[in-house]
């Protein structure tokens, strides 16, 4: 039997991919994979255990032992609700460091591929369409100017009660973009067959409708089956 269909949504930090993926999954009634939450979870667990974020072997061993429970809107690691904790800026920065390590990516890929279940999966991240699900039925790459992405991230943090300067976030995003695009393992890039969407001046609702339009063109429906099959 063929694997359940996948919609892969990639892009840099704060490009809107997480929100778009969540809403697309809800509209289709499919499962959701927030791969960024997994890497943040690894960074959080490493910090809790005082493991060096550059120690590839120790991080791999730890990652293979972690128990992830991912549900809509929350994530638990080893029974602990870390939904809010992994969204803090130090964890976000740490996740970029652990994500460049191939042993960690290999360990998490097992978790990610295991989430491909009927009726279908909407997966967001940085290498969903290029490495994890290279045969995805629809690949989307979202992008936006670094200025707009910094503003979005700043608003998210302010709404959550965190205090961080917009200038610091701008610098952090630019540095992270450079790390993600230049790393030797699974660098951030669009798949050759990805649909490119610049979200800088687009409301989320419009981006969601565009993605769903491309899904409909490929006969990907809420039932997780192709029309005519």
Image: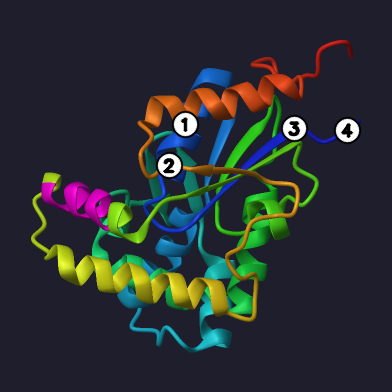
* Residue under numbered circle 3: 5
Dot 3: within a 10 Å radius of its alpha carbon, few (fewer than 14), some, or many (20 or more) residues?
many
User: 164 or 90: nearer the eye?
Assistant: 164
Q: In x, y percent, where is residue 65?
A: 55, 67
**Disc 1, SS:** helix
Q: Which mark is residue 2?
A: 4
Dot 1: within a 10 Å radius of its alpha carbon, few (fewer than 14), some, or many (20 or more) residues?
many
Between the residue at mark 2 and the residue at mark 1, the CA separation in whole angstroms equals 7 Å
* Residue under numbered circle 2: 199
Who's the residue at 64% across and 56% down the image? 190
In the displayed structure image, the side of residue 80 where residue 178 appears, left or right = right
User: 203 or 84: nearer the eye?
Assistant: 203
Which residues make up the magenta segment? 150-158
* Residue under numbered circle 1: 207
The residue most toward the top is 228
Who's the residue at 29% across and 58% down the image? 147
């Amino acid at each position: 039997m063929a694997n359940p269909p996948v919609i892969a949504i990639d892009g840099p930090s704060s490009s809107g991919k997480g929100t778009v993926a969540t809403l697309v999954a809800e509209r289709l009634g499919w499962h959701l994979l927030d791969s960024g939450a997994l890497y943040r979870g690894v960074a959080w667990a490493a910090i809790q255990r005082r493991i060096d974020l550059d120690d590839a072997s120790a991080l791999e061993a730890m990652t293979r032992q972690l128990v992830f429970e991912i549900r809509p809107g929350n994530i638990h690691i080893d029974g602990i609700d870390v939904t809010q904790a992994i969204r803090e800026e130090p964890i976000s920065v740490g996740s970029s460091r652990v994500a460049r390590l191939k042993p960690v990516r290999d360990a998490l890929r097992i978790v990610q591929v295991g989430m491909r279940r009927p009726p279908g999966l909407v997966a967001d991240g940085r290498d969903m369409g290029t490495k994890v699900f290279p045969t995805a039925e629809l690949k989307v790459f979202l992008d936006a100017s670094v200025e707009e992405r910094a503003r979005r991230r700043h608003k998210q943090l302010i709404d959550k009660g965190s205090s961080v300067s917009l200038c610091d976030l701008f610098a952090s995003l630019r540095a992270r973009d450079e790390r993600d695009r230049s790393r030797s393992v699974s660098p951030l890039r669009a798949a050759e067959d990805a649909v490119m969407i610049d979200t800088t001046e687009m409301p989320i609702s419009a981006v969601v409708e565009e993605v769903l339009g491309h899904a409909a063109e490929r006969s990907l429906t809420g039932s997780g089956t192709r029309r005519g099959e």
